[in-house]
């Protein structure tokens, strides 16, 4: 499964970057900044791939922080 971050008009770049670096595995400030810019420009960005239950936990954590996230099932 893949986790995507979607664009919103609520959260600041700094808040999104802090939320990503604090919760997404292997996400440093440079990657978080790149993700935030891609989301701003294109409306969404893939941020993590994983398996249940860990991907559901990450989804819930980011959603609880107020980020707009979406899970998508990877096609084979």
Image (spheres, helix red, strand yellow):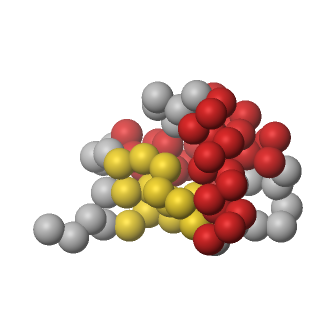
Image-quadrant location for residue 11: bottom right
In front of the other: 27 or 10: 27
- Residue 51, given in percent of the width and then of the height, sits at 28, 46
Residue at 68 percent across and 55 percent down: it is 37
- Residue 38, given in percent of the width and then of the height, sits at 62, 59
Image-quadrant location for residue 44: bottom right
- Residue 33, given in percent of the width and then of the height, sits at 68, 42
The answer to whether any part of residue 15 appears in the image is yes
Look at the picture and state if 59 lies above or below 69: above
Which quadrant, please, contains the N terminus? bottom left
- Asked if residue 54 lies left or right of residue 11, the reply is left
- Residue 41, given in percent of the width and then of the height, sits at 68, 67
In front of the other: 55 or 21: 21
Look at the picture and state if 29 lies above or below 67: above
Residue at 75 percent across and 67 percent down: it is 8
- Asked if residue 72 lies left or right of residue 70, the reply is left
């Amino acid at each position: 499964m893949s986790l995507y971050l979607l664009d919103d008009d609520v959260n600041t770049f700094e808040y999104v970057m802090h939320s990503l670096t604090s919760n997404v595995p292997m996400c440093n400030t440079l990657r978080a900044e790149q993700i935030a810019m891609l989301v701003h420009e294109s409306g969404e960005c893939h941020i993590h791939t994983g398996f249940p239950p860990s991907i559901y936990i990450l989804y819930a954590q980011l959603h609880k922080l107020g980020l707009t996230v979406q899970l998508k099932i990877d096609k084979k």
